[in-house]
Amino acid sequence: MRARWLGSLSVVALNAACAQISGVEEYSVDDVAQRPLPSRTNTVFDQRRPYLTGPQCEACVGNSCAPQLAACEGDAYCSTWLEHMRTSPGPLAAYERYQRLTDELWKVGHGGVDESGISTELVNCTTVNCLAACELGRDFSCVGKFEWSIAYPTRLRTRIQDYYGNVAPSPWTVRACLPADVDCPNPLATATTDEDGFATLELTPSDSPYSDFGGFMLLRGGSDFHEWATIVSRPFVTDDYSPWKLPAKDLVDQWFALFEEKFDPSYGYIWVIPGDCRGLAAKGVELLVELATSQGVENCSSCVYTYESDVGLPDVQRKDFSTAGRVGFISYVPARQVILTVRDTGTDQVVARQNVSVAAGRIHFVRIYPASGTQLASRGSTG
């Protein structure tokens, strides 16, 4: 029987700061870190208790994370972020915060100073120590009650490094691909990483039949690396920035060997970070892969699921996202169209859904957000 494992938290590494999977009415991200975050109190859904509030939560934060909270409240960047977290719930506001955060990462990558570090320390401390007391990652009140209204992007940015943060050997080719264009022979845009691993793709909206970019990024490097596809379940905006740290094949093989397993290139692999309505890493949810067929959908019998422990290691005892770990791993996925679903284990409610065109031998990294009304109704579609 195959081990319930695929990798570890730091395998793919979005910068650690991206633990705040945290969205956009104004879609330009020019100087986004400097512009004020707009309030979004007029929502069509009710959030749970505001972030880091309530008697049990406040007691826990006071006992375990008081220095981090005090530092945040005394810092201009972090205090603005904290106020926005508390007063502006929902996926669009979370997306704005995420854009602000990734702009900081872009700036750091080009020699600037990261102003988001204090907020990241607060998120990490409260996630490790106050996960249950503060009900972190448990806001799904927006599911099915909003739509992504985001203009088609004209430019996307990325950076590719190896697992250790060094520039990955050999230039990488980055392609922006349509959702079902598995091998991407006709990309919407193509770029090659520079000497520091950065790449920028210029997009022309008229080249796509879609009103927003709902496809994926295909990453191809040297022979020492697997092929990667990066997917998000909400549309990209102009200047979206996604940094990646990717393990070489031999390192992936070592991880599999720890569990007496092998990376089987006849299957695809899906690694997932789900978010809640506030943009925090979702908790109390499980992953499910279904196969799209001409007769409807059926469960994936070959798929195995693994979730991270509190210390970011694969835990074969975990059946869902119930720890401080953020990544779920699905191995041995057939190379075909599948439906990735995130389900609340307490209510059995579907909270997120994404169609994925799986390719054999490819690792697909998915950031999946709460489902809009349209996405919630899309089960079994091939778009």
Image: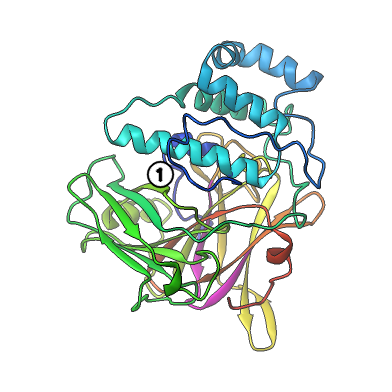
Three-letter code, disc 1: Ala
Query: What range of the chain is rendered magenta?
Result: 327-340
Q: Position of residue 5 (x, y in %)?
A: 50, 54
Q: Using the image, determine if residue 7 lies above or below residue 357.
A: above
Q: Quadrant of the C terminus?
A: bottom right
What residue lies at 77% left-to-right and 43% top-to-bottom?
Answer: 43
Q: Is residue 145 magenta?
A: no
**Depth check, front residue: 141 or 202:** 202
**Depth check, front residue: 378 or 84:** 84
Q: Using the image, determine if residue 353 lies above or below residue 68.
A: below
User: Which residue is identified by label 1?
Assistant: 13
Most common secondary structure along the magenta stretch: strand
Query: Going by the image, does 108 lie left or right of 238?
Result: left
| Disc 1, SS | loop
What residue lies at 42% left-to-right and 43% top-to-bottom?
Answer: 14
What residue lies at 46% left-to-right and 27% top-to-bottom?
Answer: 116
Q: Residues within 10 Å of mark 1 (few under 14, many from 20)?
A: many
